[in-house]
Amino acid sequence: MRALDSPRRMIVVVPTEEFRRHQAATLPRAGSISAEVSDPVRDRLLALDAAAKVRARGIRVLEIDGSRNTEEVAGLVADHFGPYL
């Protein structure tokens, strides 16, 4: 049983490592989340592996690096799902 009938019906949004570090250093709530991670290197490797696996299945991965504002990211996601709305 497949969860999706098309890879276009999904998008995965992930931060780049640099952006994740920046967020953890500058946002108190982001830093507190990272503080609870017992093995951040393992978690980053799992995130990279997950992104690679969904890419291999034709699912779009949108990397967040801080170069786009919230509205621009929301616009990209809305455009991605536009054919289904």
Image (cartoon, helix red, strand yellow):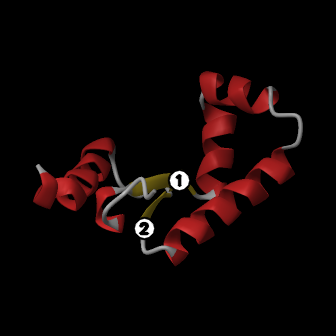
**Where residue 57 sits in the image (x, y, percent)?**
49, 73
Q: Residue at x 82, y 45 (%)?
A: 40
Q: Indicate which label's residue lies in the foreground, 1 or 2.
A: 2
Q: Quadrant of residue 60?
A: bottom left
Q: Which residue is mark 1?
A: 14
Secondary structure beneath label 2: loop
- Find residue 2 and report its horizontal and vertical position in percent: 43, 58
Q: Where residue 59 is drawn, which disc sits there?
A: 2
1 to the left or right of 68: right
In terms of depth relative to the viewer, which is nearer, 75 or 52? 52
Q: CA distance from mark 1 to mark 2?
A: 13 Å
The image position of residue 14, as x and y in percent, is 53, 53
Q: Secondary structure at mark 1?
A: strand
**What's the residue at 84%, 52% (across, down)?**
41
Residue 49, x across and y down, in percent: 69, 64
**Relative side of 36 to 77, left or right:** right
Q: Residues within 10 Å of mark 2 (few under 14, many from 20)?
A: some
What's the residue at 69%, 47% (across, down)? 21
Q: Amino acid at mark 2?
A: Ile
